[in-house]
Image (spheres, rainbow, N blue to C red):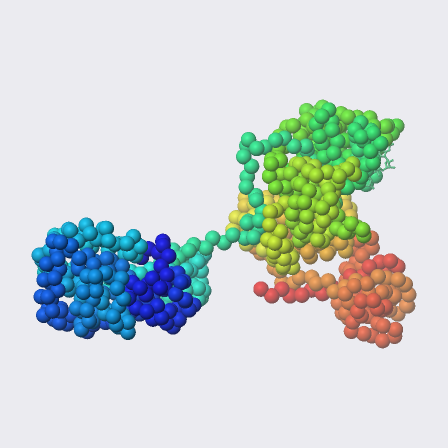
Amino acid sequence: MSTMFKYRVHEVAKDFKVPTKVITEVLTEYAATPKNHMQVLTTEELDLIFEYLTQHHQVASIEEIFAVASPSASEPAEKPAAKETPAGRPAPGQRPDEQKKPAPSAPAHTERQTAPAPRPENQQQQQQPVKKPDKPFVPRQAPQKRVIDTSGATINIDKYDERLDNLVPERAERIKSGKEKFTNKKNQSRGQTMASGAKRRQEERERMQRLQFEVAKKAQLKVSIPDEIGVGELASRMKKTGAEVVKQLIKLGVMASLSDIIDYDTAALVAIELGCKVEHEVVVTIEERLIDDHADKEEDLVSRAPIVVVMGHVDHGKTSLLDKIREANVVAGEAGGITQHIGAYRVAVNGSPITFLDTPGHEAFTSMRARGAMVTDIAILVVAADDGIMPQTVESINHAKAAKIPIIVAINKMDVPGANPDRIKQQLTEYELVSDEWGGDTVVVPISAKTGMGIDRLLEMVVLTAEMQELRANPDRAARGTVIEARLDKGRGPIMTVLVQNGTLKLNDIIIAGTAVGHVRVMTNDRGERVSEAGPSVPVEISGMSEVPDAGDTFNAVADERMARELVEQRKAEKKNASATSVKVSLEDLFSRIQQGELKDLNIIVKADVQGSAEAIKSSLVKLSNDEVRVRVIHSGVGAISESDVMLAATSGAIVVGFNVRPDNAARDSAVRSNVDIRMYRVIYDAINEIEAAMKGMLAPKFKEVVLGHAEVRQIFKASNIGTICGSYVTDGKIIRNCKVRVIRDHIVIHEGELASLRRFKDDVKEVATNYECGLSIEKFNDVKEGDVIEAFIMEQIKD
Ligand SMILES: Nc1nc2c(ncn2[C@@H]2O[C@H](COP(=O)(O)OP(=O)(O)OP(=O)(O)O)[C@@H](O)[C@H]2O)c(=O)[nH]1
């Protein structure tokens, strides 16, 4: 039924020839909102009225109508027949009537005794008031149809059709596309016409059913089904019982219980069978919706400045070099400009920009890498000509290698008398860095950060190396990059320096960085100037964040702040569980990972008390390589296990092997946070054996060491009968009686053994907690000194 036009309550009443009141009463009773007579009716309301009227005016049987109608049929039959030629009035009179009403109304409302009544009226004009308003349906279909039926054999229906066209008001025509029905009757015989009455009713009924079906279809439950769904979950989404779903599954040949997971196709079949409309639920995370990470098209990419980090051993001149480069730039660029230390700065070398990370040392670099942020493109390795390669130089080399970035060596302090660059070059070859002058591919530039000598050439080499890398980015998209520094400023709130890596960051952009969200309120460049835009490789300091993000956090400019806040909440929740769930390499699961082919390289970081041990362990470990797994010592050095070692291990999926050394506190915390396995040994043979056993799946991890706490030795007493008593202070954890202990001096383990006695004042005690003093002695060991650290531990059995 088309309701393109407005069909009002009073018009419906008129067409049905019932008082408006009847219609409003029906609506008041059955529809949601009572209507007054001028109100427009919806399709549903019309349906309701028709349904109501139909139901309240049903006939017992169709034969009954015809039976009664027949005797009286002669008269009316004559009438139309008589009038057929001159005017054809009755029939057309009825037809328009039918036109309006039968369409919506149901076929059955017929009343025998009233059947003849409408005819005269109809003959006059169908608009005539109904005589029996209390029986509003009286004058309609059935009698009319009957009249037509009886006369239909003799009349020329075409004529009526013609007149009908003229008479039927447009509105009525729209109510029902009944016209075809009349035209279709052209060829009907009388009997057929009679039958057509029933047929029409049948059609009406079907129409009603269709309508109802459509309504039902609209109300059909929509279920969204993901790629996989639990049977129970599917049942609840369909508002069905689990049993119904299971039954349906069995019909499809799938035996599944409520807790089983079924795939989308199966679930969709079940849902359709159970009368639901299925939608494929594609799980899109907020992150995916919020952050645009589409790959850039080739044509959108433009070249960007390289991002350079300066690394090297302590005091080899990293800061001096960075300062010198910046100074030169400030003088050349903005004379008198105040240089801001924002964590990174840009210089231009013959028009080619270079971005320097201005936090020297590899700590920042590694911490960023540990968090998955790949910021730098080139590393400058500073080696002091008068000092040569030192432990941190080696660390730096290994970090850069692990990050797979090119290394440019700057041999610094060339102004110092006796500087011998060749010696450095020689040393470098031991680390696979062969100078280009010697036929290798490592650029080595002698410089002096003091005099400025060689710095221009160094920068030119940086530009050249960058050109080889073809560094490109797309400035025409939302910005993405990394937080390189962040702090809380008393006056300005959270401040962070970000390095844009792709896209362009604009003032007022909404940004999300780690678990911080905010707007770019003020943006300052490395010269302290306020800027409104920052493109790829440009560092800027930003204020406007809700909280201080962490260095190394990725930032993104996004379109929807509300969603960004949602994502931040989600990230905070994830962060809570993160450390517990991150999977890193450990000796325990080594074998199974090798077996599953997950692990091809076993990366190891070796730290030892002396260089000789480190080298010995390194070469022995490398020899453990077999067909399935290659053992690689990615870094080895002398001294305590530092946080930097742990970070390198975390980023490279390595195990840290300590020989006679201990991790410092920061390293220990970091290892716990990032799930790095640190193994400590006192005998080289043990180290090799254990790792070999782990690789073969024969590791007998029956016991694991649990560190209980640490105590600092503050005073030494010598007692002739007991030996050395250490007056100690428990700095963390606790010390318990009969535990195992290690004596650590300057991060080096000098003894490992058993605790002989533990006392507070003069009493033996079971344990001593943090911040308490105690006296302890170690079995068969008296060479304890003030300042030594006693590490208390126990061996705990590992439960499988
Ligand atoms: N003679 C000479 N001295 C230099 C040169 N470069 C740096 N120095 C000096 O070496 C010392 C250490 O330099 P820094 O730049 O602080 O070294 P660094 O590598 O940044 O040191 P950390 O920040 O401690 O890791 C300072 O006293 C500098 O003056 C140079 O080219 N020639």
Residue 203 showing in the rendered view: no
Q: Where does the N terminus fall, quadrant-wise?
A: bottom left
Q: Which of 267 and 541 is in front in this view?
A: 541
The image quadrant that residue 411 belongs to is: top right
In this image, 96 relative to 422: left or right? left
Q: Residue at 54% of width from left, 34% of height from top?
A: 297
Image x and y of residue 41, in percent: 38, 62
Q: Which of 197 and 714 is in front in this view?
A: 197
Residue 478 showing in the rendered view: yes
Q: Residue at 68% of width from left, 52% of height from top?
A: 516
Q: Residue at 65% of width from left, 47% of height from top?
A: 510
Image x and y of residue 485, in percent: 74, 46
The image quadrant that residue 228 belongs to is: bottom left
Ligand 1's quadrant is top right
Q: How many marks?
A: 0
Q: Residue at 88% of width from left, 75% of height from top?
A: 762
Image x and y of residue 64, in percent: 14, 72
In this image, 565 relative to 452: left or right? left
Residue 254 against residue 60 in the figure, above or below: above
Image x and y of residue 395, in percent: 73, 42
| Residue ranking furthest to the bottom | 763
In this image, 599 relative to 633: left or right? left
Q: Where does the C terminus fall, quadrant-wise?
A: bottom right
Q: Which of 459 and 392 is in front in this view?
A: 459
Q: Nearer the viewer, residue 464 or 545?
A: 545
